[in-house]
Image (cartoon, rainbow, N blue to C red):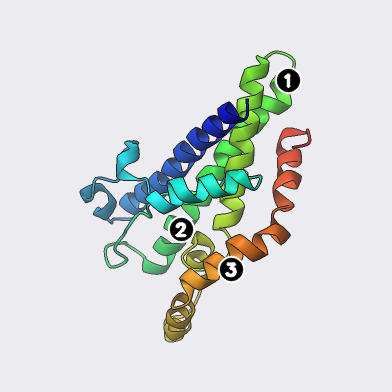
Amino acid sequence: MAELTFIISIAILIMSVILHELSHGYVAELMGDPTPRLQGRLTINPIKHLDFFGSFIVPLITSIVGFTFGWAKPIEWNPYNVKNRRLGEFLISIAGPASNILIALVFGMAIRFGAESLPQSFLVISAYIVAINITLAVFNLIPIPPLDGSKILFSFLPPHLAHVRANYERYSIFLILLFIFVLWRFIEPVVPFIFRVITGVGL
């Protein structure tokens, strides 16, 4: 049973992070930047999106300690191609977490309103989908480079403060590892709270 739960969690995670990155790519395309399309990233083909460390190693480690988490290869986009650079960065950056929130809402509503009519197996899988997508959204909205939250924050910075961003991003690897393995435990309780708000049941 534990092995099946692990496989289901990893499958849901992979599809969720792919849709997360696709959302970035499609919004970039809408804003005038063809880079994701030219790089072949506007596809659901997992090979184009998966990152060995973020899509396999991290999910394996986090599943062992009690929650499944990871990421896909980030979508690249060219800020000089978008119609409005600051607005473009904001919309492209927020598109990923927004897609995870939307997925969580859709399956959360299925749990809330279909508890008595839908198969139990579907409700269980839906619960995993909601939990994983909430986790992805919350994590990615943290304002630490290279997470989406930092890019959303930076999109509001005036140009003359660009050096602040450069200095902040210099320590991105250290900051993200510190957050995952030390600080995440303080923010993780937000996930079951949002889960209950969406689904009406406890996680």
Q: Could you tell me which residue is drawn at 57 percent across and 26 percent down?
A: 4
Q: Which residue is mark 1?
A: 115
Which of disc 2 and disc 1 is earlier in sequence? 2
User: Mark 1, mark 2: which one is toward the viewer?
Assistant: 1
Secondary structure beneath disc 3?
helix
- Location of residue 171 with respect to 190 vertically, above or below: below
- Location of residue 114 with respect to 153 vertically, above or below: above
Q: Could you tell me which residue is drawn at 54 percent across and 56 percent down?
A: 140
- Location of residue 5 with respect to 39 vertically, above or below: above
Whole-angstrom CA distance, mark 2 to mark 3, is 22 Å
Which of disc 3 and disc 2 is earlier in sequence? 2
Whole-angstrom CA distance, mark 3 to mark 1, is 39 Å
Question: Few, some or many C-alpha atoms within 10 Å of disc 2 (few <14, some 14-19, many ≥20)?
Answer: many
Amino acid type of the residue that numbered disc 2 sits on in the rendered structure: Ser
Residue 107: % across, % down:
61, 30
Disc marking residue 93: 2
Which of disc 1 and disc 3 is earlier in sequence? 1
In front here: 129 or 83? Answer: 129
- From where the camera sits, is residue 71 visible? no
Q: Which residue is mark 3?
A: 178
Q: Could you tell me which residue is drawn at 71 percent across and 40 percent down?
A: 195
- Location of residue 67 with respect to 1 vertically, above or below: below
Residue 158: % across, % down:
47, 80
